[in-house]
Image: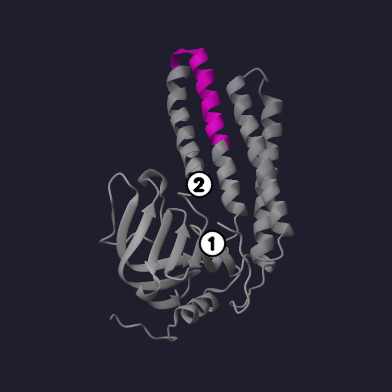
């Protein structure tokens, strides 16, 4: 998907700073410092020939460096993503995609956990006995994180986004993608007290879902939704919920822009034809 550029006529951009920005920077710096302290403490207390512990130390150092990098990237960011032009499956679109730094940070951590699990499995099998037995569930846990990273790289798990094409409204989320016709959307409004925008939909919603074990908790699942076995594709109805916490627009402003783009009157629902 193309990286969006600024689009004229979009909703007002909100400020990215203050507690939101510097609170995130401080939290990540604290985590990085804790990781550094753990590495130093373990290296001082544990013999370096204890391979399994050294592998854990290596992952902790890796995670700490990633977290430090995320803190720096957040400190240098002057704004969150705003509405712009892009493409959806080769079709021109206009919309907004959330800041991806945290997303790829999580993917990098998942890759590290996969490598750690494989390394601990090798150590356990080489040691034999109970070490081999305990290394198997650790390796399986690492494989779970590896599959999650693969799903992200393959586009099955996505950065939160909302795109409007000539014919469709497309919503990306960590559990997959959903799509409806533009004329199916009957109401768009912010959800009071949250960072979400609600799109009410008349008729079925076409959804391509992650495998269930990697789908995670989401605000999409509703009674009546179903998944077609073996394909990851599904249909549901009723609503689309867009998370705006990592977007450069307030939910109310973004909802107003979507309503305008779809030709919906403020505070009114489009009636079914």
Quadrant the N terminus occupies: bottom right
- Please name the residue shown 61% across and 59% down the image: 3
Callout in the foreground (2, 1): 1
Residue 81 visible in image? yes
Q: CA distance from mark 2 to mark 1?
A: 18 Å
Give the side of residue 254 with respect to residue 236, left or right: right
Circle on res. 118: none
- Please name the residue shown 70% across and 39% down the image: 36
| Main SS category, magenta section | helix
Give the side of residue 82 with respect to residue 68, left or right: left
Circle on res. 87: 1
Pointer 2 with pointer 1, Cβ within 8 A? no
Scheme of colours in the image: one colour
Residue 242 pos. (x, y %) = 47, 66
Which residue is under mark 2? 152
Is residue 230 shown in magenta?
A: no
Magenta-colored span: 112-130
Along the line of sight, the residue nearer the viewer: 233 or 128: 233
From the viewer's perspective, is residue 154 above or below residue 21?
Answer: above
Element type where label 2 sits in the image: helix
From the viewer's perspective, is residue 121 above or below residue 7?
Answer: above
Give the side of residue 24 with respect to residue 183, left or right: right
């Amino acid at each position: 998907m193309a990286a969006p550029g600024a689009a004229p006529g979009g909703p007002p951009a909100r400020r990215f700073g203050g507690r939101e920005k510097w609170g995130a920077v401080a939290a990540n710096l604290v985590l990085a410092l804790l990781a550094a302290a753990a590495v130093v403490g373990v290296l001082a207390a544990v013999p370096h020939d204890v391979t399994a512990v050294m592998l854990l130390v290596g992952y902790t150092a890796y995670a700490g460096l990633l977290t430090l990098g995320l803190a720096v990237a957040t400190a240098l960011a002057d704004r969150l993503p705003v509405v712009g032009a892009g493409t959806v499956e080769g079709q021109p679109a206009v919309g907004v995609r959330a800041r991806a730094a945290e997303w790829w940070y999580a993917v990098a951590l998942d890759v590290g956990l996969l490598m750690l699990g494989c390394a601990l499995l090798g150590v356990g099998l080489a040691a034999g006995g109970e070490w081999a037995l305990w290394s198997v569930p650790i390796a399986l846990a690492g494989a779970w994180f590896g599959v999650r990273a693969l799903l992200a790289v393959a586009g099955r798990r996505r950065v939160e986004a909302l795109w409007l094409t000539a014919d469709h409204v497309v919503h990306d989320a960590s559990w997959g993608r959903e799509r409806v016709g533009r004329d199916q959307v009957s109401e768009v409004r912010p959800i009071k007290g949250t960072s979400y925008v609600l799109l009410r939909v008349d008729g079925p919603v076409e959804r391509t879902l992650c495998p269930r074990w990697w789908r995670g908790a989401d605000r999409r699942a509703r009674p009546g939704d179903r998944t077609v076995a073996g394909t990851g594709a599904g249909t549901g109805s009723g609503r689309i919920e867009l998370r705006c916490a990592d977007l450069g627009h307030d939910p109310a402003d973004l909802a107003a822009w979507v309503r305008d783009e779809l030709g919906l009157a403020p505070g009114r629902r489009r009636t079914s034809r």
